[in-house]
Image (spheres, rainbow, N blue to C red):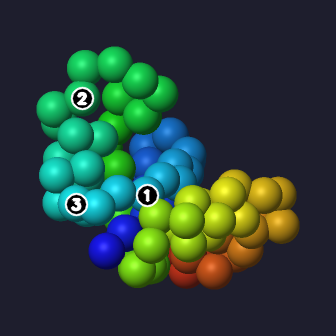
Amino acid sequence: MYTVYILYSLQHRKIYIGFTTDIAARFLSHNQLGKKGWTIKYRPWQIIHTEVFNTKQQALLREKALKTGRDREWIWDEFIANLQL
């Protein structure tokens, strides 16, 4: 199983989109364990959306789609605008 996930950094107003086979370990890496990479600059992160797929190919296609301008706008409208802040 593959999970496509969307993270949001309230403090920095940034989103991150990725996929993994172990969402708990990946989230821990983004928020605490990771020592390099783009996401460490914008901690802390919260998971705002996940979708599960049976194959890596399906997950990659969905991740790619979510990174388009249209779907990024959908993410802001659907999830971030509705966050209880």
Residue located at (35% from left, 28% from top): 40
Q: Total label count?
A: 3
Residue located at (71% from left, 65% from top): 65
Please tell me whether mark 1 sits on a helix, a strand or a loop. strand
Residue located at (67% from left, 58% from top): 64
Q: Amino acid at mark 3?
A: Asp
Considering every residue shown, the one lying at the far top of the view is 36
Q: Is residue 60 left or right of residue 41?
A: right
- Up the image or down, 27 lies above or below 62; here it is above
Q: What residue sits right under mark 2 in the picture?
A: 34
Depth check, front residue: 58 or 50: 58
| Labels 2, 1: front one | 1
Please tell me whether mark 2 sits on a helix, a strand or a loop. loop
Q: Is residue 47 left or right of residue 71?
A: left
Q: Residue 22 shows which numbered tag?
A: 3
Please tell me whether mark 3 sits on a helix, a strand or a loop. loop
Q: Amino acid at mark 1?
A: Phe
**Residue 43: where, in percent of width, then height?**
34, 37
Answer yes or no: is residue 41 visible.
no
Residue located at (22% from left, 60% from top): 22
Q: Residue 19 shows which numbered tag?
A: 1
Answer yes or no: is residue 65 visible.
yes
Mark sitting earlier along the chain (2/3): 3
- Up the image or down, 21 lies above or below 55; here it is above
| Labels 2, 3: front one | 3
